[in-house]
């Protein structure tokens, strides 16, 4: 199960949401530490002027949490030392874990993933690209897998994070982005794909995907799902090898079923 995330695809806002949540949690912990130290400020001693102001408490909170500790302000009472040991220290450790976790997640993990995915992309060949993973696209993927297609051969393109997560669940590679974008299609090596199946949901979007893919891969077999009968010829002229209208297909199947029933009677 792999996930391809080229630099020019549309990226989800989730990483920034995670950073915002972690930053908010860190600020809340710092505020809690400050409140504890302000509440017990009489247990602290300022070796510079002997008095502890609001600014002094805020300063002591920051240097305590960051483990700098210049020694100009120190806890002198037993209660102040217990507060530092059992309340401030856990807050300090948790804040450091937040910072380290964010650094690992953003700097190291994402850099490693980008490098790893570039290596995977180099070897991506003879795969089936699914542009759109809504109700129709997901059913197509399930049918392909049921017919013996290895899920590792499937590459799903969709703008929705929920759709790409659903594609990951079946073992497909995913790209979160716009399938009508040259950069996204190039990222999935569209010119080396075995087939492109377009189920974008909107006819105009599906036709644009077909046009873009055909320009990049003139020999690529392309199948597209079109909702309006008037757009079938347009999709065909855009370069699709197979144009499927679910409504028309359903109508034909129902008519055939009705004819058989009538003949049987």
Image (cartoon, helix red, strand yellow):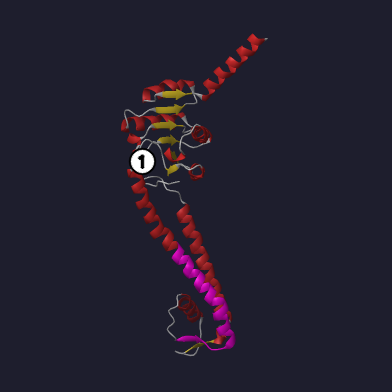
Residue 35 position, x and y percent, is 56, 75
* Left or right of 75 in this view: 185: left
Q: Is residue 79 magenta?
A: yes
Residue 212 position, x and y percent, is 35, 32
Residue 7 in view: no
Q: Quadrant of residue 185?
A: top left
Residue 206 in view: yes
Residue 156 position, x and y percent, is 44, 39
Residue 205 position, x and y percent, is 43, 32
Magenta span: predominant SS is helix
Which of the image's four quarters has the C terminus? top right
* Left or right of 11 in this view: 28: right
Outermost residue on the front side: it is: 148
The residue beneath circle 1 is 124
Give the residue at x 48% y 59%: 20
Q: Is residue 195 magenta?
A: no
Q: Which residues are magenta?
A: 72-101
Q: Quadrant of residue 263?
A: top right
Residue in front for this viewpoint, 42 or 145: 145
């Amino acid at each position: 199960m792999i996930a391809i995330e080229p630099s020019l695809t549309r990226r989800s806002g989730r990483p920034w949401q995670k950073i915002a949540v972690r930053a908010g949690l860190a600020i809340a912990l710092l505020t809690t530490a400050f409140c504890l130290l302000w509440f017990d400020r009489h247990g602290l001693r300022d070796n510079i002027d002997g008095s502890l102001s609001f600014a002094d408490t805020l300063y002591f909170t920051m240097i305590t949490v960051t483990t700098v500790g210049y020694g100009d302000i120190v806890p002198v009472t037993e209660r102040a030392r217990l507060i530092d040991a059992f309340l401030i220290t856990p807050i300090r450790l948790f804040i450091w874990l937040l910072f380290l976790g964010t650094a690992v997640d953003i700097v190291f993990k994402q850099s490693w993933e980008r490098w790893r995915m570039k290596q995977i992309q180099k070897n991506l060949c003879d795969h089936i690209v699914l542009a759109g993973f809504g109700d129709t696209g997901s059913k197509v993927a399930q049918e392909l897998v049921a017919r013996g297609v290895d899920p590792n051969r499937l590459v799903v393109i969709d703008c929705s994070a929920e759709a790409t997560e659903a594609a990951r669940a079946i073992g497909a590679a995913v790209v979160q982005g716009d399938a009508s974008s040259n950069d996204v299609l190039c990222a999935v090596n569209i010119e080396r794909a075995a087939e492109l199946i377009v189920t974008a949901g909107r006819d105009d979007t599906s036709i644009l995907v077909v046009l873009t893919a055909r320009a990049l891969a003139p020999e690529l077999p392309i199948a597209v799902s079109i909702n309006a009968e008037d757009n079938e010829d347009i999709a065909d002229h855009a370069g699709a090898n197979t144009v499927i209208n679910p409504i028309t297909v359903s109508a034909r199947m129902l008519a055939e079923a009705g004819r058989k029933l009538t003949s049987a009677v």
